[in-house]
């Protein structure tokens, strides 16, 4: 299952640091994503694009995560020669991450999208 089936994202950048928020479509998926969407998994998925550390901040009251990706913008948006290697394209790449689906909750028919 793709991450985009469980969440959407928003981004921001400052210098060479990218901020990607991953927001659950349904708060019931937060715990599943907390278990499977680690900083290491995000860094591995984005490969050589992220040259610095990835830090995950948990926001359970919002059913969201904030990932801060260091050295991810080719020196910064204004210094990079890439046409669009900023937040939006990297968040789109992150939404393509394959994850195991959440386990269905027998008491909740809508525990994950079909």
Image: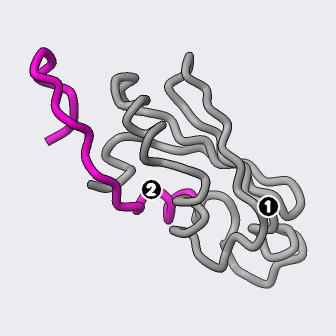
Q: How many marks?
A: 2
- Within 10 Å of disc 2 (Cα), the crowding (few <14, some 14-19, many 20+) is some
Residue 57 against residue 82 in the figure, above or below: above
Quarter of the image that includes the N terminus: bottom left
Residue corresponding to mark 1: 70
Main secondary structure of the magenta stretch? loop
Separation (CA) of disc 1 from disc 2: 19 Å
Q: Position of residue 92 (x, y in %)?
A: 50, 60
Residue at (70, 56) in percent of width and height: 54
Residue corresponding to mark 2: 95
Q: Which residues are magenta?
A: 91-114
Residue 50 against residue 103 in the figure, above or below: below
Say whether residue 109 is left or right of residue 45.
Answer: left
Residue 73 lies in magenta, yes or no? no
Model colouring: one colour
Q: Position of residue 5 (x, y in %)?
A: 31, 46
Identify the element where label 1 is drawn.
loop
Q: Pick the residue in front: 87 or 21.
A: 21
Q: Position of residue 39 (x, y in %)?
A: 61, 53
């Amino acid at each position: 299952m793709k991450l985009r089936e469980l969440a959407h994202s928003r981004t921001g950048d400052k210098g060479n640091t990218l901020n990607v928020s991953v927001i659950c479509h349904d708060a019931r998926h937060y715990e599943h994503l907390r278990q499977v969407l680690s900083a290491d998994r995000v860094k591995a998925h984005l490969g050589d694009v992220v040259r610095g550390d990835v830090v995950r901040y948990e926001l359970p009251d919002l059913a969201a995560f904030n990932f801060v990706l260091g050295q991810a913008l080719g020196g910064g948006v204004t210094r990079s020669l890439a046409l669009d290697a900023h937040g939006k394209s990297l968040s789109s790449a992150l939404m393509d991450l394959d994850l195991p689906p959440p386990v269905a909750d027998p008491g909740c028919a809508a525990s994950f999208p079909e």
